[in-house]
Image (cartoon, grey):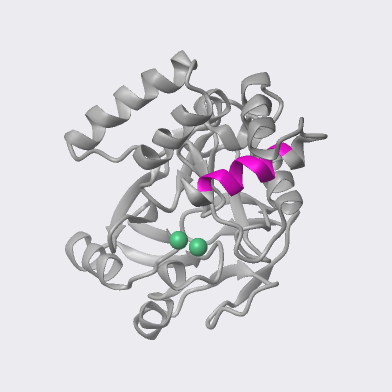
Amino acid sequence: MTEIRALPAFDDNYIWLLRAHDQVAVVDPGDAAPVLDHLAHSGDRLCAILATHHHGDHIGGIAELLARHPVPVFGPAAEDIAGVSHPLAGGEHIEIPGIGVEFEVLAVPGHTRGHLAYYGPSLCGTGAVFCGDTLFGAGCGRLFEGTPAQMQASLAKLAVLPAPTLVYCAHEYTQGNLRFAAAVEPGSVAVQRRVEEVAAARAARRATVPTRIGVELETNPFLRWDEPAVRDAAASRLGHPPTDAVETFAAIREWKNRF
Ligand code: ZN
Ligand code: FE
């Protein structure tokens, strides 16, 4: 049984740690210190590193970890990340040594050009996806290197995962994102309920991730391009009805950039 734990880093990053049989793999170690700390205190051994994309807050700790623990590093072939020993593209299947977890690699470009997500269909009984800065609680990543069409297609790949799938995002952004979700869909009971749940969690200093695909489908405006209320919100930004899902998504993303 694989256990998944969050190692908080910087202001609002989560480094995800997957643990089985005293071996741990880490996803997006932007900082080596919390990982080294965990290894020192637990006696666990590092067995692999996975990276979703090339931003410093996701890969900044890889060199230092590798210097002490020469382990395989999985990451996007389409991005330049020092230390990656297993360059990957979407559609590949990998098995993480040590913990024996199998992932399907999903290409989810948009935030960055080569962004990957790692989907483990059998993790936690429900399936789990590590999606970096693509999908957040009630939000999505900024489009630094991709087009709205790419990002919408990437989010659509995540949206079709089974509803109970756990979503391990790389940032604690849910509360701020929900303020925006409530502006997009002021009439949504599901969004209002989640605003209250997340406020309570944050007041108690609890993480709001992992979330679940089903929760995101109900409350995340960046997955709800087919919803009449979201299309209406996009139309009022655009000044005309959106022609398709991409235009709806693009208008909502653009609004969020200025929100
Ligand atoms: Zn990023
Ligand atoms: Fe990030």
Q: Residue at point 26% right, 72% down?
A: 33
Q: Is residue 19 above or below residue 165?
A: below
Q: Is residue 196 visible?
A: yes
Query: Is 44 in front, or is 15?
Result: 15
Instruction: Give coordinates of residue 210: x percent, y percent.
Output: 41, 39
The dominant secondary structure in magenta is helix
Task: Name which quarter of the figure residue 200 lies in.
Answer: top left
Position in image of residue 137 (x %, y %): 45, 39
For residue 41, above or below residue 64: above
| Number of numbered tags placed on the structure image | 0
Query: Which residue: 47% across, 21% down?
Result: 186
Q: Which residue reaches farthest right?
A: 243
* Residue at the spot 37% in from the left edge and 44% down from the top edge: 3
In this rendering, the answer to whether 156 lies above or below 233 is below
Q: Residue 119 at x, y = what percent?
A: 60, 46
Pick whichever, 60 or 94, lies toward us.
60
Residue 249 is inside the magenta segment = yes
Provide the residue span drawn in magenta. 248-256
Q: Is residue 237 magenta?
A: no
Quadrant of the frame with the N terminus: top left
Residue 161 seen anywhere in this rendered image of the structure? no
Q: Is residue 232 left or right of residue 136?
A: right
